Image (spheres, rainbow, N blue to C red):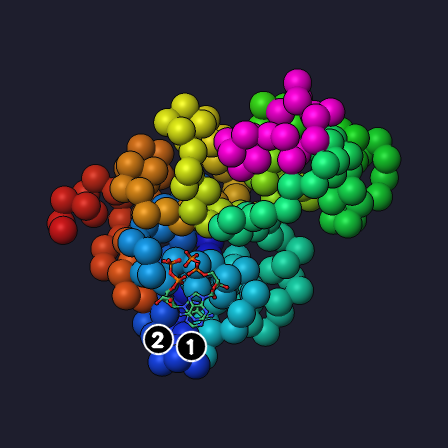
């Protein structure tokens, strides 16, 4: 469970990007819906400890994230928007390198983890191809494989379906839904169907504020 209470963030230019946001986010896939400029990325970066809020609290499974960022980072998988590094190195090699950085130093354990993620993301056949040669959908699936190294308990995915064709989008969302029961997975998106199709819970934000939250169909019906 991720618990946000009265979070606030105003940038130097005066934009109040996060305006008193309180949310309880349970395990499973959670949709964070909002138009461009709603504050989704600001909220994701704040939860991921990449930027500080001005005030408010964040607790993950009872642990104060602001006081102990390292504890959160050890449990975090983060796929930023426009994740842009696609080198001419194979997916297999890259994942192996990232796995080492994540602390998977035992060779057998690492091989097992990397292979399982390549299977999960349907990249096994393409594992020896350079990530730079991948299609948009494959790149996003590779990004998720990388984010899932080390079995994170909190997975944050920022606008992952932008630019994907319908088949790739479905594939990607189904993959997110399969990540695991004990994992909090936050999917940020401006596409209503991303949330209504697969997320059991959602919140809609605009101008930094929570407009509605709950089960998608019921919540959207109140708009
Ligand atoms: P979203 O992800 O929903 O598109 P953002 O969190 O990126 O929303 O942006 C929310 C608002 O904050 C926008 O008005 C954006 O221009 C502004 N903003 C985002 N990042 C910064 C920043 N680093 N400095 C100043 N303003 C920012
Ligand atoms: P998003 O679509 O996720 O909101 P943006 O394109 O708004 O992404 O932001 C990309 C980067 O630019 C982020 O690091 C964000 O903090 C920064 N940024 C966004 N809006 C502004 C702004 N008005 N002033 C300064 N930096 C901004």
Quadrant of picture, ligand 1? bottom left
| Mark 1 CB near ligand 1 (8 Å cut) | yes
The answer to whether residue 124 is magenta is yes
Whether residue 148 appears in this view of the structure is no
Picture coordinates of residue 143, whole percent (x, y): 59, 40
Q: Residue furthest top?
A: 125
Q: What range of the chain is rendered magenta?
A: 123-140
Residue at image mark 1: 11
Nearer to the camera, 175 or 41:
41
**SS of the residue under disc 1:** loop
Tell me if label 1 and label 2 are in contact, CB under 8 Å.
yes
Q: Is residue 223 above or below residue 42?
A: above
| Mark 2 CB near ligand 1 (8 Å cut) | yes
Report whether 136 appears left or right of 24: right
Residue at image mark 2: 15
Q: Residues within 10 Å of mark 1 (few under 14, many from 20)?
A: few
Report whether 115 appears left or right of 170: right
Q: Which mark is drawn over residue 150?
A: none
């Amino acid at each position: 469970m991720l618990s946000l209470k009265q979070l606030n963030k105003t940038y130097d230019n005066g934009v109040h990007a996060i305006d008193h946001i309180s949310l309880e986010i349970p395990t499973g896939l959670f949709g964070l819906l909002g138009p461009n400029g709603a504050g989704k990325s600001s909220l994701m970066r704040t939860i991921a400890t990449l930027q500080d809020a001005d005030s408010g609290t964040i607790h993950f499974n009872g642990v104060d994230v602001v006081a102990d960022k390292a504890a959160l980072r050890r449990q975090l998988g983060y796929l930023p928007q426009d994740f842009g590094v696609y080198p001419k190195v194979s997916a297999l090699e890259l994942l192996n390198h990232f796995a080492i950085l994540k602390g998977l130093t035992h060779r057998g354990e690492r091989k097992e983890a990397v292979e399982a993620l390549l299977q999960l993301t349907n990249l096994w056949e393409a594992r020896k191809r350079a990530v730079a040669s991948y299609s948009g959908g494959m790149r996003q699936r590779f990004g998720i494989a990388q984010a899932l190294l080390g079995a994170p308990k909190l997975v944050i995915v920022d606008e992952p379906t932008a630019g994907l064709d319908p088949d790739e989008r479905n594939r990607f969302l189904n993959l997110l839904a399969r990540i695991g029961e004990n994992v909090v997975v936050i999917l940020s998106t401006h596409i209503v169907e991303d949330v209504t199709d697969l997320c059991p819970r959602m919140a809609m934000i605009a101008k930094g504020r929570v407009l509605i939250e709950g089960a998608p169909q019921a919540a959207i019906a109140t708009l």
